[in-house]
Amino acid sequence: MTAEVVRRWGSSLDSVVVYAQGALCRRIARGTVPGDRRVRVTGLPRSLDPGSLRARVLGLPGLRVTEARVEVEAEPVRAGLAGDGDLLRREVDRLSDEQAAARARVERQTRLIKEVTALHPVPPARKREDPHRRTPVDAWLDLADFVDERLAGLHARLVELEKAVTVVDHELDLAFDRLARASTDAPSAHVDTTVSAVLTLAADHGGPVDRDAEVTVEVEYGVPGAVWVPSYRLDHRQGDETGRLVLRASVAQRTGEDWTGVRVALSSADLQRRTDLPRLRSLRIGRRQEAPAPSGWREPPAGLAELFAGYDSAGPRPAFRGSPMAGSAPGSAPVAVAAPPPPPPAPAPAVAPSGPPAFTGVPDFAASAPYGGGAPQSPVAPPPAPMARLAPSAPAPPGGLPAPPPPAPPPPAPVAGPPEPSLAELDYGALVLSGPDDRAGRRGRLFPDVTLDPVATEYRRRAEAVASLPLPGRTVRPRASAGSFDHRFDAAARADIPSDGTWHSVTVGEIAVGLRTEYVCVPSVEQTVYASLLLSNATEQALLAGPVEVSVDDDFLLTASLPTLAPGAVRRVGLGPAEGIRVSRRTQLRESVAGLRNNITVLDHRVHVELANRLAKPVTVEVLERVPVTSDADVRIEERADWTEPDSGAAAGRQAPGTRVWRVRLDAGATSALDGGYEIRIPTGKALVGGNRRS
């Protein structure tokens, strides 16, 4: 199959489902079916997983896809068609050369300064019989002036060169940053790679295909290198019982293709999670067993060994040591060297056991038996035989030579049973026929093609690096907050997300939530009233944990952390102090004795709380107080107030034991006074351990 005989269909990316790590992309292609019913859908990214390719026909029930395969084409980039990535790489190379040249100039200037600094007067050598000479001071001073003047000019030039190096370093850092943030949806510097899905179409029941009808094909494939985290924006109006909670997502992808105008969906599920159910086989006692499921393996054709008899009788092919282009003199004939004789034929492969082979990660396809010739072996190589060791107490034989190792144990006898080919051997399209130059045990048989594509591996490695991006503030990964459930969120509008490996904000949609404003104060701890929102999830989907930006009356207030909310769950979000509501608290303690013999100490606590509403609307304020608790039956606590115990559901949180609540409704500009208290009756024989009992 070549590119010339297969009709090409252009495709456009329609939708993307971003999972906790990785994405599932869907492309749409349209065209008319050619005579051979094979089409090539172009536009796929280089980092796609070939095993995830799926295709189907839309709109025509009588037509289906019978085969889908990934093929890669490469061609040199034509001059003048360099993309943005190529231009950025050229800019980085140019600035790197400038940086090296600038630093070389600085080093040269530094060496010159050291040479000038080393200049100093050296008097001539004096013999013993020569008298002492007078030092020419003018010459010394002239040399010192020359050195100072020269060093001043050199240092000024050095400062200019160091500034130039600083500027070039900054420009190079910016160029590297632009290159790192550039989209990967561009050809490399010299080669343009095209990834296509080759599809084979067929009509149901073998009927003819209408060539004039336009066919729409949907191609689905998975790609690594895409992550997302949720965030929220909450808009609230004071006095309203409702609000707008907008779900936004920060999405980063480096899949190798720009997502332009696509429908985006977000899922908290794991794309690589297993979905197949375990199969429990029956246990049968007796000689009669169920017939095994038929596999695709067939016996090799008879006379396969004689097929290459004529090829072997022709003798070895001549091998050439060199060619005229590889260093030989022009016009000289190449020297022929006889090739070594072919190796002896390998023994027939053993029959694979009937049980399934153990999975070790990467099967050894090269060592497995051919599919379509001989019984296929297990894809797992047998473990090496243990090395023979000499016993510590074994005496050495005469002559000082070590004792020979014991012979290796014989290999186990093969277990009779039907062959079980591996998954790679069942992939018929990936099987390659071994040629006549292969070893005797493989010639003329089908084996899986295990040739790895290093370019595709490098693309996937770069794409998976997105998972290590630092998260935005207060964000939590979906798998960490989803727990044991998975949900999907569909964006309301199409979005654009370039393949640059940076975070991009996508608005998913508005979520219906219930809101209720409450004012809470704990005057015994702090005489301040705090405003809070009771947020209830009124949808059938859970809200994942993430940051929420709270705006009240169109004014940004704060950014809080929203925990995971299951359907119907309620959480309190604090809004900070409410300056329009004032609170004050006074306490009074009276100590007395009671009982026939004054053997009971009575501690009477009085609490007086005053509230003042300075807002232009009525509010409801919860005042939290505390009452002592005791585990001693002889110590009694009598309450004298109209407060109540908190309701855990209404308070949306678990309160400490002994907490009491006043709920007061205040009109605009109104005030209210609350009086309460409690008595503690302690027998004389009882004493409080630790703390001040009168506080």
Image (cartoon, rainbow, N blue to C red):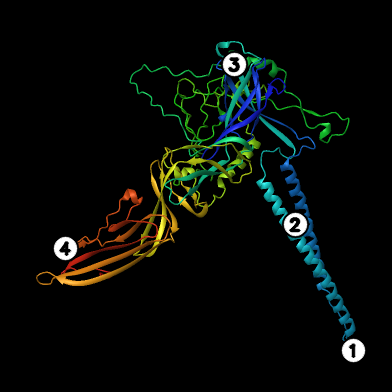
The disc at residue 168 is: 2
**Real-space Cα separation, disc 2 to disc 1, in angstroms:** 60 Å
Secondary element at tag 4 = loop
Q: Are marks 1 and 4 in contact (CB under 8 Å)?
A: no
Instruction: Note whether 517 is above or below 337 in the view shown.
Output: below
Q: Residue 315: give x, y in percent of width and height.
A: 72, 20
Residue at screen point 43% across, 41% down? 542
- Left/right placement of residue 658 relative to residue 176 reads left
Instruction: Note whether 371 is above or below 193 in the view shown.
Output: above
Residue designated by label 1? 131
Residue at screen point 80% across, 61% down? 105
- Say whether disc 1 or disc 3 marks the residue closer to the N-terminus: 1
Secondary element at tag 2 = helix
Q: Work out which quarter of the rendered image holds the N terminus and state it.
A: top right
Q: Nearer the viewer, mark 1 or mark 4?
A: 4
The disc at residue 202 is: 3
Residue type at the position of mark 4: Asp
Residue designated by label 4? 634
Residue 87 seen by the camera: yes
Q: Quadrant of residue 281?
A: top left
Residue type at the position of mark 3: Ala
Residue type at the position of mark 2: Val
